[in-house]
Image (spheres, coloured by chain):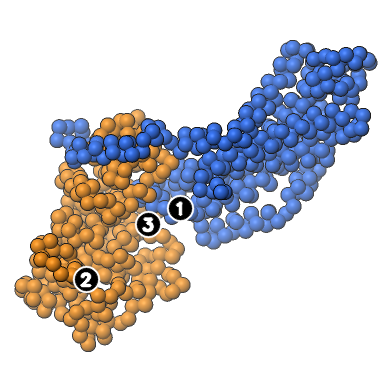
Amino acid sequence: MTTSDGNLLEVKDLRTYFETEDGTVKAVDGISFQLKRGETLGIVGESGSGKSVTNLSIIRLVPDPPGKIVSGEVVFNGSDLLLLSNDAIRKIRGRRIAMIFQDPMTSLNPFMKISKQLMEMTQLHLGHSKSQAYDHAIRMLETVGIPDARARAGNYPHEFSGGMRQRVMIAMALSCEPELLIADEPTTALDVTIQAQILELIKKLKSKTGTSVILITHDLGVVAGMTDHVIVMYAGKIFEQARTSELFSLPGNPYTKGLLKSVPDPTAEQGKLYQIPGLPPDVAHLKPGCPFAPRCDRVQEICRREFPPFVQLNADHYSLCHFAREVYSESGGTPIQ
Amino acid sequence: MSIEKDPDQIHIAPEMAIAEADVRSEEAGEFVRGSSLWRDAWRRLLKNKLAVFGLIVVVIVTIASVLGPTVIKAVFGFTPDYIPTQIKLNRSYPPFTGPDGEFSWLHPMGTDNAGRDQLARVLQGGQISLFVGVIATLVSLLIGVTYGAIAGYVGGRFDNMMMRIVDVMYSLPYVIVVIVLLSLFRSQTPRGQLILLFVALGSTSWLTMARIVRGQVLSLKNQEFVLAARATGVSGTRIIFRHLVPNTLGPVIVYATLTIPQIMLTEAFLSFLGFGVQAPLASWGSLASDGIQSIGIFPWQLICPGVTMALTLFSLNFLGDGLRDALDPQMRTV
């Protein structure tokens, strides 16, 4: 069952706040986006911009307390996940929405055999018997390219390298053939060659199974190669949202421009690597106005005073900036009116 | 989709993956094949001479206690509570001494006031003492681990409440609690009394276990594998008992081995006071209690059960310390 416009997932005005002694941290503050079946959405942003919390909110795993999903809707396949009972959401986790985590070193239980961890998934969700689940686990390990899967299945996680563990995590995440895969910085803890292999693996499995993917990362290179749409997050808000190709060629937000400029360019002769000055703001104490204003190179009086509007620049292109149209034009685009 | 074993199966650079595994096995050397935490810990334990000594003594005492009385009955023909009918035999003989003062293998530990074989009684007492120690420890494991794991995993106000209950119980002098329990519900049969002893000891010894497990779970539950398990839809109970509890096993085993001698000591103490095991059943404590009444004339009646118990408790403590060092290498004091 799909909503009329083919969206698998629709997030509407999601707000997740954390109550701390320091005040309310608005980790995610009014996020909305859609994800179509079979598409890949990239979410980029600096540390603490709310990428991970967004995704934990989708499957309702935000630690509570102190976290709380204050408002919003997460419509998955036509039903709002935020309204489901705990049992119902548990049946969706892993079965229809699976997650891959950042650090493969710690996301496997050190005391359980690989096979057991893989089997738990299908026994739980697909009602497999032990032997069925075991065979399935072996098949999944082979699918993700673990050599000699039958022998390796009896090993414990510490006997695997980082790349292999991430493969196991992917095997686990995909073993129930979920409709949505959330990959939270799946390659951050891995070195570059393994990174490429893992991304390639996710891509191939995705094209094979038609799974939609949300890819959280702070690596723009990964986004460029993997995704159809990109969301740029900053201070718990969406700063820019566009098709991947358009975002990279015609950025409509000073923050995105800054991010793109910070990517090392191997063709440049020499010189210092560009960096956006300053640090991400403390989301517990946001001042009125644009949260990026203190770091922005084209900041104006209005930026410090008023919260910027979410401007539509193109069919699928939005930007949160007082000067979105100007920035977009500078990039070479023609904003729609 | 269906994931079949088909020709276009996705093997991203399998040769790279294999190379990766090979490099690893070369680096890790001998460890790679089947080196589990347990095997590692076992190797470390075997290096510790005191622990090995403890292990051997514990095994010997256990086997002797379990089989001893039966063997003695088969070979010599008397049970631990056999009182000779001949008046001549009905007095206490020193170890290795026959009825006429000659050397004899019949009673290696002598006999007691009623002429019962001391060795058979000590071994049977060992049965009871070890049994009480193990069962009460298992009870404390069951309650303590469950209680602590639930408190730690749920956390927040619930955890606070549960641990305050533990604190309150901690502050009660538990020997007195046990004595009160035992005298209130004093049972008529020796077996009933024994069961009461298990309950009394088990119900007061789980407190430290609960604290240890809670502490472990608190630090474990924030690890990513727990989040990963939740993200795959595993229920809370299953996470506690399948994912968290096995991870606390190291400290739990260590503490359990150290609890056994502690409980055996308490049992001996209670039996010594007359609250524990009742005749004709015997435990090391009740034997020592009998022996002390005639310590001046028949010292072997106290020495034999006393030394056996001391040796066993020493060994259990050595074993427990060895296990702690083996399972928790970081904690080893330099």
Which of A73 and A229 lies nearest the eye of the viewer?
A229
Chain that bears disc 3: A
Mark 1 residue crowding within 10 angstroms, few (<14) / some (14–19) / many (20+): some
- Measured as percent of width and height from the top left, residue B183 is found at 81, 43
Q: Nearer the viewer, mark 2 or mark 3?
A: 2
Chain that bears disc 1: B
Taking the view exactly as shown, the residue that stands out farthest to the right is B87
- Measured as percent of width and height from the top left, residue A34 is found at 21, 61
Q: Nearer the viewer, mark 1 or mark 3?
A: 1
Q: Are marks 2 and 3 on the same chain?
A: yes
Q: CA distance from mark 2 to mark 3?
A: 33 Å
The residue at 83%/40% (across/down) is: B273
Residue type at tag 2? Gln
> Pointer 2: what residue?
A275
Secondary structure beneath dot 1 equals: loop
**Residue A39 shows in the view:** yes
Which label sits on residue A61?
A: 3
Residue type at tag 3? Leu
Q: Which chain is orange?
A: A
Q: Which chain is blue?
A: B
**Residue A129 shows in the view:** no
